[in-house]
Image: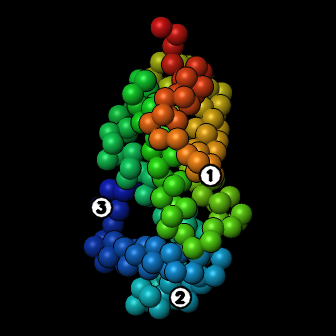
């Protein structure tokens, strides 16, 4: 998975502080304006930095979105102990739950997400989920690519489906129903 939330610990404190300011500005502007309307100039002004400093950290707002998604998702994975390279039933359930919660939180925080934003988030999240599953499966499977890929699409697809439902069942109920569909290809038959 990349980058871990604590990977920034190796960075110079000034770099960490600047990135934190940029991320805080990004989250605030995302809520206020939505992704499409926010600009690098907006981000720089809100962060209290100049555009050149922004570009020293991120190529553009798309790179910043990718970093923000990966960092936030990685923090959730670490916080819930799923970075332990264990693919047991509880971890698979927790992963489905985290992805659902993550997409719901994004939906609540973003002013008018649009297809481009959704596609960028999807790409970053799928890569993170896939990397996590590959780490889990590599411990006991010589070829983990196919099951990790299928499970990644299943988890992301199920979470997207849940986040778009008009009438959502309790999340725990949904995860209980979704779990066997994901686990079939991941976990050894018991």
Q: Position of residue 160 (x, y in %)?
A: 62, 48
- Sequence-first disc among 2 and 3: 3
Front position among marks 1 and 3? 1
- Sequence-first disc among 2 and 1: 2
Given the current orientation, which residue lies at the most extreme top position?
A: 190
Front position among marks 2 and 1? 1
- Sequence-first disc among 1 and 3: 3
* Residue drawn at 63 percent across, 68 percent down: 113
Q: Which residue is mark 2?
A: 42
Q: Which residue is mark 1?
A: 166
Secondary structure under the numbered disc 3 in the rendered image: helix
* Residue drawn at 60 percent across, 84 percent down: 39
Question: Mark 1, residues whose alpha carbon is within 10 Å: few (<14), some, or many (≥20)?
Answer: few
Query: In the picture shown, does residue 107 fall above or below 73?
Result: below
The residues tagged by marks 2 and 1 sit, at their Cα atoms, a distance apart of 33 Å
Query: In the picture shown, does residue 189 fall above or below 58?
Result: above
Given the current orientation, which residue lies at the most extreme right position?
A: 115
Q: Which residue is mark 3?
A: 9
Q: Position of residue 29 (x, y in %)?
A: 50, 80
Question: Mark 3, residues whose alpha carbon is within 10 Å: few (<14), some, or many (≥20)?
Answer: few
Q: Position of residue 173 (x, y in %)?
A: 48, 34
């Amino acid at each position: 998975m990349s980058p871990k939330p604590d990977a920034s610990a190796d960075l110079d404190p000034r770099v960490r502080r600047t990135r934190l300011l940029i991320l805080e500005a990004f989250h605030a502007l995302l809520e206020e304006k939505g992704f499409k309307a926010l600009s690098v100039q907006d981000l720089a002004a809100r962060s209290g930095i100049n555009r050149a400093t922004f570009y020293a950290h991120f190529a553009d707002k798309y790179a910043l979105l990718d970093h923000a998604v990966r960092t936030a998702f990685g923090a959730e994975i670490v916080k819930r102990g799923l970075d332990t390279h264990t693919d047991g039933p509880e971890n698979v359930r927790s992963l489905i739950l985290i992805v659902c919660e993550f997409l719901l939180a994004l939906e609540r925080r973003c002013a008018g997400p649009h297809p481009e934003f959704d596609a960028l988030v999807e790409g970053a999240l799928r890569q993170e989920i896939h990397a996590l599953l590959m780490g889990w499966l590599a411990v006991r499977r010589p070829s983990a690519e196919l099951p990790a890929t299928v499970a990644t699409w299943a988890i992301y697809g199920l979470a997207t489906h849940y986040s778009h439902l008009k009438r959502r069942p309790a999340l725990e109920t949904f995860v209980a129903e979704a779990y066997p569909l994901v686990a079939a290809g991941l976990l050894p038959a018991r």
